């Protein structure tokens, strides 16, 4: 039942992602019929919603209201205030006018009925009996309507249906005496309960959706592809770039030789590109658009982990391993690195400034740690060198940052390959300090990749065959699925 949900379910994800608007294919008429456009939009919307429910375990809806600073918010506030003020005037008139109140009671009844489960037979019958609108209208006509009695019944019914997270709000309803305020709050809490019911339904359906998700997403994307044949253009370019890089990597040891290029290796390299995608580049592959927000977030985490490990490596190199063995030193240093670098990934200038401040903080912590070791200290030139090395980490071609980045790339690629016989590369000491976070990131990345590969494998396979095996060549490569 809905009241078995816990409070964690109230957390709401970011705005529901969706496939970007697909361009009209070459050769299409300049305008399409409204019905076909609406059909395509509904298909994209359904696909995005189903995908989000399946891949995002924390997905839930949250009641949305327009910002009070927006025009929509101001208009909504004015209309609502006018409605409730009008109801107040009607109830205060002599004799009271219950026209609007009766309409509200009908709405409340409809909302309560929508919250009932099939097994609530007795409660449904009781609702029809107590909130009998014909009887209520007769009571209005005879001046015998008791709003407080009906409100008490409504609140008790809400209490029996609501999730535990709403118990406090239900209790607050019992303390309200003024009819207009009471009705307004009843409507607000009922709205929250309807959202709770939707989220409960989603949680209940998730196991069934998981069983059908792959076939459903394939079918929906095929519908989009049928209506927009150019829907794989960016995906093709994405795979083409990965294939070119893979071919260059194979030729690197021996430029005169060209070994076979694995379709799996190309696809894994393409997936790795998504963690380093330029936010300004709009040529994002269509088949991964629904996961872009998640992949962008993982890419930012990856960048921060590389910088953190780089700082740890430099500090260890300049200060010696003894200082890293001091109780609490590494934990305190990591907290400082994470705090000072937070939010600095979006602009180069912010990263430069953050690294300058971080260098000062690292020197301070190193000095304090050494001062407790019988007056031990580092030469000033070593401290200055460490500070300078940390400040230079903003450069993408910085040798330390590049080295750590390559090790991380190798680790993630090994996780993508998977299998009991595949082993992750040995991590250097600084990376072992962030191994837990790196492993969590790798598993999250791997889940996204695995599901995407499973769903879109049939779409990738013909594209990879065309790229890897031009007409006339034998198709001996690996299947991308």
Image (cartoon, rainbow, N blue to C red):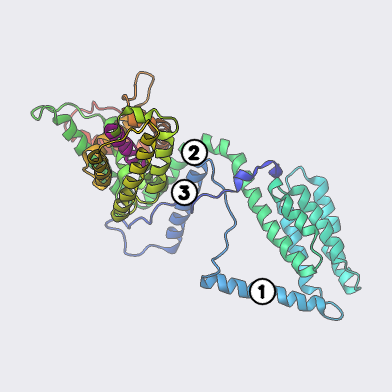
User: Does residue 117 belong to the magenta stretch?
Assistant: no
User: Magenta stretch?
Assistant: 303-318
Q: Earlier in the sequence, mark 1 or mark 2?
A: 1
Q: Is residue 416 visible?
A: no
For numbered disc 2, what is the local secondary structure? Answer: helix
Indicate left or right for 305 with 69 as reference: left
Q: CA distance from mark 1 to mark 2?
A: 44 Å
| Mark 1: few/some/many CA within 10 Å (<14, 14-19, 20+) | few
Q: Nearer the viewer, residue 51 or 3?
A: 3
Give coordinates of residue 453: x percent, y percent.
Answer: 38, 35
The residue to which callout 3 is attached is: 48
First along the sequence among labels 1 and 3: 3
First-in-chain label (3 vs 2): 3
Could you tell me which quadrant the C terminus lies in? top left
Rendering quarter of residue 319: top left
Percent x, y of residue 83: 69, 74
- Pointer 1 residue: 81
Looking at the rendered image, the disc whose residue lies closer to the viewer, 1 or 3, is: 1
Residue positioned most to the left: 256
In the picture as drawn, the residue positioned furthest to the bottom comes out as: 94
The answer to whether residue 371 is visible is yes
The residue tagged 2 is: 213
Could you tell me what secondary structure mostly forms the magenta stretch? helix
Residue 218, quarter of the rendered image: top left
């Amino acid at each position: 039942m809905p009241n078995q949900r816990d409070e964690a379910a109230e957390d709401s994800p970011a705005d529901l992602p969706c496939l970007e608007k697909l361009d009209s294919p070459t050769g299409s008429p300049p305008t399409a019929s409204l019905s076909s456009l609406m059909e395509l939009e509904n298909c994209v919307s359904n696909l995005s919603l189903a995908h989000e429910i399946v891949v995002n375990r924390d997905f839930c809806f949250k009641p949305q209201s327009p910002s009070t600073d927006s025009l929509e918010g101001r208009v909504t506030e004015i209309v609502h205030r006018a409605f409730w003020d009008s109801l107040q005037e009607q109830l205060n008139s002599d004799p009271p006018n219950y026209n609007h109140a009766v309409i509200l009671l009908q709405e409340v009844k409809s909302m309560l009925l929508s919250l009932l489960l099939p097994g609530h037979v007795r409660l449904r019958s009781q609702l029809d009996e107590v909130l009998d609108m014909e009887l209520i209208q007769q009571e209005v006509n005879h001046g015998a309507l008791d709003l407080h009695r009906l409100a008490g019944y409504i609140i008790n019914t809400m209490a029996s249906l609501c999730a535990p997270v709403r118990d406090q709000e239900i209790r607050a309803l019992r303390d309200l005496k003024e009819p207009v305020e009471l009705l307004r709050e009843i409507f607000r809490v009922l709205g929250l309960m309807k959202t709770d019911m939707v989220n409960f339904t989603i949680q209940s359906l998730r196991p069934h959706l998981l069983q059908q998700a792959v076939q459903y997403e394939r079918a929906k994307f095929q519908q989009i592809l049928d209506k927009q044949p150019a829907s794989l253009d960016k995906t093709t370019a994405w795979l083409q770039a990965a294939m070119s890089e893979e071919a260059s990597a194979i030729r690197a040891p021996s430029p005169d030789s060209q070994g076979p290029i694995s379709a799996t290796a190309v696809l894994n390299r393409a997936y790795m590109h998504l963690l380093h995608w330029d936010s300004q580049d709009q040529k994002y592959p269509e088949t991964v658009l629904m996961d872009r927000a998640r992949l962008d977030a993982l890419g930012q985490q990856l960048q921060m982990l590389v910088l953190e490990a780089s700082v740890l490596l430099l500090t260890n190199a300049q200060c010696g391993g003894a200082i890293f063995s001091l109780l609490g030193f590494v934990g305190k240093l990591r907290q400082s690195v994470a705090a000072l670098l937070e939010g600095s990934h979006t602009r180069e200038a912010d990263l430069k400034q953050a690294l300058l401040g971080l260098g000062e903080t690292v020197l301070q912590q190193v000095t304090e740690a050494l001062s407790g070791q019988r007056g031990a200290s580092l030469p000033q030139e070593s401290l200055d060198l460490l500070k300078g090395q940390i400040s230079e980490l903003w450069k993408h071609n910085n040798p330390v940052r590049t080295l750590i980045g390559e090790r991380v790339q190798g680790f993630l690629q090994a996780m993508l390959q998977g299998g009991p016989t595949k082993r992750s590369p040995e991590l250097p000491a600084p990376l072992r300090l962030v191994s837990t976070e790196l492993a969590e990131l790798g598993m999250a990345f791997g889940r996204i990749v695995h599901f995407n590969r499973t769903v879109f494998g049939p779409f990738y396979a013909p594209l990879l065959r065309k790229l890897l095996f031009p007409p006339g060549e034998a198709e001996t490569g690996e299947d991308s699925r």
